[in-house]
Amino acid sequence: MTRVDEARFEIRPARPGEAALLSALALRSKAHWGYDEAFMAACVDELSVAPDELTRRRAHVVTVEGEVVGFYTLDSLDARRVELGHLFVEPAWIGRGCGRALLEHARRTAGALGYRVMIIQGDPNAAAFYRAAGARRVGARPSDSVPGRTLPLFELELSDP
């Protein structure tokens, strides 16, 4: 697959009518890594986004030629720290720069809001992506969906806007 010129990416706030579309996109993106049906069923609640959450969680989507191909959410933890709640890309767009564009947008948005550190609980398959973006692994966290599973936990320092 070839990389897409990032100038073609448009990132905008998610719209309440897009919650179901984003929830389905998150599930397709997670399934891309080969998880079985039982695992995916266990993740449905955690990966779903309700319409009323999109504004509070500062959800943004990336589009290419008007088509939503990915999204992220930010969850405030305290005055200094924000968590990247979701970052998912349509499987056909993985590896084409959309995720990087979303993460950079999330980083700038969080920094402009005054946060200094972004916490990221990443899927093990995305660990290299987050490390390449400058995130530092700081430990692990138990999965909210799958008992006994732990997920890598990262911190990403945010610069002043």
Image (cartoon, helix red, strand yellow):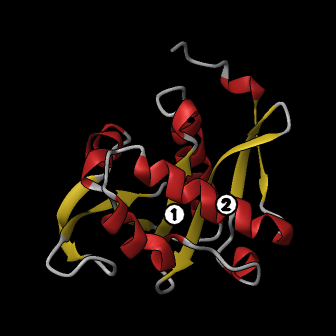
Q: 50 above or below 125?
A: below
Which residue is pictured at 31% across the width and 66% down the height?
39
Find the distance from the CA under tag 2 to the CA under tag 1. 10 Å
The image position of residue 69, as x and y in percent, is 67, 42
Q: Earlier in the sequence, mark 2 or mark 1?
A: 2
Tag of residue 42? none
Q: Relative to residue 150, is residue 131 drawn left or right?
A: right
Say which quadrant the C terminus sits in.
bottom right
Label 2 packing within 10 angstroms: few (<14), some (14-19), many (20+): many
Which residue is pictured at 56% across the width and 31% down the height?
92
Determine which quarter of the picture holds residue 15: bottom right
The residue wearing badge 2 is: 22
Residue nearest the observer in this picture, 37 or 45: 37
Label 1 packing within 10 angstroms: few (<14), some (14-19), many (20+): many
Residue 161 visible to an observer of this rendering: no
Tag of residue 86? 1
At numbered mark 1, what does the secondary structure look like: helix, strand or loop? strand
Residues under numbered marks 2 and 1 in contact, where contact means CB atoms less than 8 Å apart: yes
At numbered mark 2, what does the secondary structure look like: helix, strand or loop? helix
Q: Relative to residue 108, is residue 100 drawn left or right?
A: left
Specify the amino acid type for callout 1: His
